[in-house]
Image: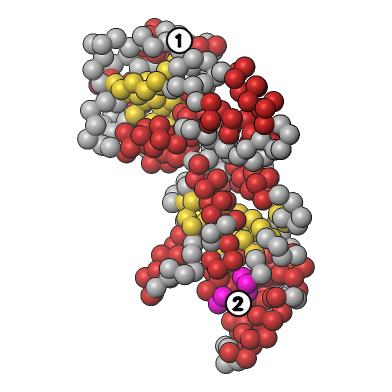
Amino acid sequence: MAAGKYQESYSSRFSYCKYQVFLSFRGEDTRKNFTDHLYKALVDAGIHTFRDDDEIRRGKNIELELQEAIQQSKIAIIVFSKNYAWSRWCLDELVKIMECKRNGDCIVFPVFYHVDPSEVRNQTGSFAAAFVEHEKHYKEEMEWVNGWRIALKEVANLAGMDLGDGYEAQFVQSILENVSKNLDPKIFHVPLHFIGRGPLVQYINSWLQDGTHGAAIALLYGIGGVGKTAIAKSVFNQNYYKFEGKSFLSNFRSKDIVCLQRQLLFDILNKTVEINDPDEGILKIKDALCCRRTLIVLDDVDKRDEFNKIIVMQNWLCKGSKIIVTTRNKGLFSANDIQWIRYKVELLDDEKSLELFSWNAFGQANPVDGFVEDSWRIVHYCN
């Protein structure tokens, strides 16, 4: 298949997906530990995730909801653990996931958590014991049991990820990276340990989702390297699919304005638009923005004139559209610009700085023994 045809098929298939990831797991094994950590990492990275939990299911409506969630997900992550095969619900869910994969409707990532892939493939070990009981209990429904076996063998033959003797934090990071590579290219990488920025991200999310808020523009300002772009990426990841059009224009001040205008129009219209000069670009942007709810991020804007070459008048924007601007220039907008809100991105305090440093240096929330004083010295020097 030619690359162009593949891209067309891929984008049309996934354009209506409600979820980016469907997370399947055995609740009693991993609900409060590994799967919870994985779910949080996915959500913090802005990946819209449906978390399944076999302990809260009740009735046929829940079953239907789960089936629809599988069908409307781009990726299914299946966490295989010791007791996974004891749950008929998990096995039925697996069968449905593999049906979607065969139809080309989702990508499947098997994750082996303290279980060898061969146990899943051949139903040995704890999986063998579970199937002994299934064959006794469902002896009148052996076609179901055989279907479970086929699905387990099929999924275990896929390229999966095995924890083995590794560290869980690194394992979660590897899963997150693999998922991100297979999602919409609009997904941006966000640090796994996004320390101290959660409240601000939540506040901006609330503003984005508030259709009654009069402000159409949010200004994130602060010194260079403080985390403005990472915050904007996290917010964009978590919200872009809710808008009819979306565009993230990065490193704004270092790029030619006509190139930025072309990129914006390509992102929104999904086609190349020829522009010969900035004035022509302004008019074409006006036509593109007036009739669709759009989320736009303008990253690292330095001067108001740069902004005006993209958005001249706020009344161009369709109702519900939102623009996020990151800048080092606190005075980018004047007091007369009444339809905007401002957030100052502050430096992390010493405690959170130490935690961020520790995650990056040691893979944990605190310095390892013997490096506490050195870690504090580095944090104080950087701050």
Residue that appears at 30% across and 22% down = 341
Q: Are there few (<14), some (14-19), or many (20+) residues within 10 Å of tag 1?
A: some
**Residue range (magenta):** 83-88
Task: Tell me the SS state at disc 1.
Answer: loop
Q: Is residue 229 visible from the viewing direction of this image?
A: no
Q: In the rendered image, which quarter contains the C terminus?
A: top right
Q: Is residue 26 visible from the viewing direction of this image?
A: yes
> According to the image, label 1 marks what residue?
302
Left or right: 2, with 272 as reference point: right
Disc 1 vs disc 2: Cβ atoms closer than 8 Å? no
Q: Position of residue 25 (x, y in %)?
A: 57, 63
- Inspect the image, locate mark 2, and give the three-letter code of the amino acid beneath it: Trp
Q: Are there few (<14), some (14-19), or many (20+) residues within 10 Å of tag 2?
A: some
Residue that appears at 41% across and 65% down = 65
Q: Position of residue 368 (x, y in %)?
A: 70, 38
Asked if the stretch drawn in magenta spans residue 85, the answer is yes
Location of residue 310 with respect to 113 vertically, above or below: above
Location of residue 41 with respect to 334 vertically, above or below: below
Q: Main secondary structure of the magenta part?
A: helix
**Residue 86: image tag:** 2
State the residue in front, 371 or 148: 371
Residue that appears at 56% across and 75% down = 87
Q: Position of residue 336 (x, y in %)?
A: 23, 11
